[in-house]
Image (cartoon, coloured by chain):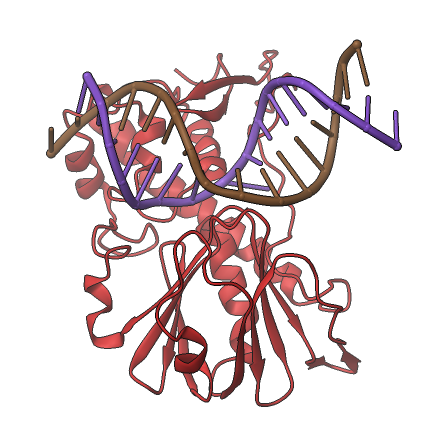
Chain colours: A red, B brown, C purple
Amino acid sequence: MPELPEVETVKAGIAPVMEGLVIARAEVNRPDLRWPFPERMAERLTGQRVLGLRRRSKYILVDLASAETLLIHLGMSGRMLISGHTVGEFHHPHPVPAKHDHVVFHMENGARITFNDARRFGAMDLMETARQEDHWLIRDLGPEPLGNAFNETYLVERLKGRNTPIKSALLDQRIVSGLGNIYVCEVLFRAGIHPARKAGRISAARVASLVPLIRDVLSEAIAAGGSSLRDYRQSDGELGYFQHVFQVYDRAGKPCVTHGCDKTITRIVQSGRSSFFCPQCQR
DNA sequence: CATACCCCCTGGGTGC
DNA sequence: TGCACCCAGGGGGTAT
């Protein structure tokens, strides 16, 4: 689930019950996720005021009054459930503890943020806020796709001479950070580029055309997530569950949505991951 | 350095 | 209802 738009949505969803508030207690129910938690994580979180939340790529960064920053990654199946808060007249009760509730933030106002992650590909770590750029998970990340550093000139330069499929290149977080399997498929469909095409053998003009398409796809997804978050009554407090209408992702065998195209969406496997595309519209 | 695989882990869906 | 198998939105590590 979580690519950049979902992480942005989750961040926005938990911000109202974290920012400016003290973590009365951090409940840590196991020693690790993908990697061991940092030393004394529960103690270093408990009693800390949350100064603010940020997002870098697919990471949520929680700045604490202790001058430390909590890094959270949702992996493939990570979820954030909010409970104990009130939206309008609706109060969200705390749920019964569920399987895979690995970390629970008990906030001073009674709200809880529960990190649930069945597959445990997620991660948490603590770092000095001042040295966040040096963190081993952060330091090699490419530019934010919605930021100014990601532009046509940059992408053309980065893909020049690359022998790797464009699909793999756009999934490479060192080139551009935040895209995942779904949105890369969607972007390549909009661009009319076959996912197996070698990145270095696409014309500069077509590479450049990817930049605004990437921004569009991500912005639209963030907007969709934001709209679903507005109505807490319909949700159970679980974030990142909005459904998008994908044009190619997970649509193998279904008709291409392009007007006048009578082909069906094809699935291939590239470096172990599914790619969906229209063999007629994408070359 | 660039590229290709393998792996971590649990659960849902499908076919028999 | 059981079971075997495939698949999953991520990404680090290692071999080539």
Relative to the observer, which residue lies in front, B6 or A256? Answer: B6
Q: Is residue A35 above or below residue A184?
A: below
Picture quarter with the C terminus of chain A: top left
Q: For residue A164, which quarter of the picture?
A: top left
Q: x%, y% of residue A6?
A: 52, 54
Q: Residue at x 46, y 39 (%)?
A: A183
Residue at position x 71%, y 67% from top? A97
Residue A191 is drawn in which quadrant? top left
Q: Nearer the viewer, residue A265 or C4?
A: C4
In the depicted structure, whether residue A134 falls above or below residue A89: above
In percent of the image, x 26 and y 35: which residue is there? A208
Residue B13 located left or right of residue A2 = right
Q: Please indicate whether residue A249 sits to the left or right of residue A130 in the image.
A: right
Q: Residue at x 73, y 64 (%)?
A: A236
Looking at the image, residue A177 sits to the left or right of residue A140; the answer is right
Residue A264 drawn at (x, y percent)? 60, 14
Q: Can you give x and y, in whole percent of width and height, for residue A25 in the image?
A: 53, 83
Foreground residue among A181 and B15: B15
Q: Nearer the viewer, residue A44 or A250?
A: A44
| Quadrant of res A258 | top right
Residue A214 in the image: state x and y as whole percent. 39, 42
Q: How many marks?
A: 0
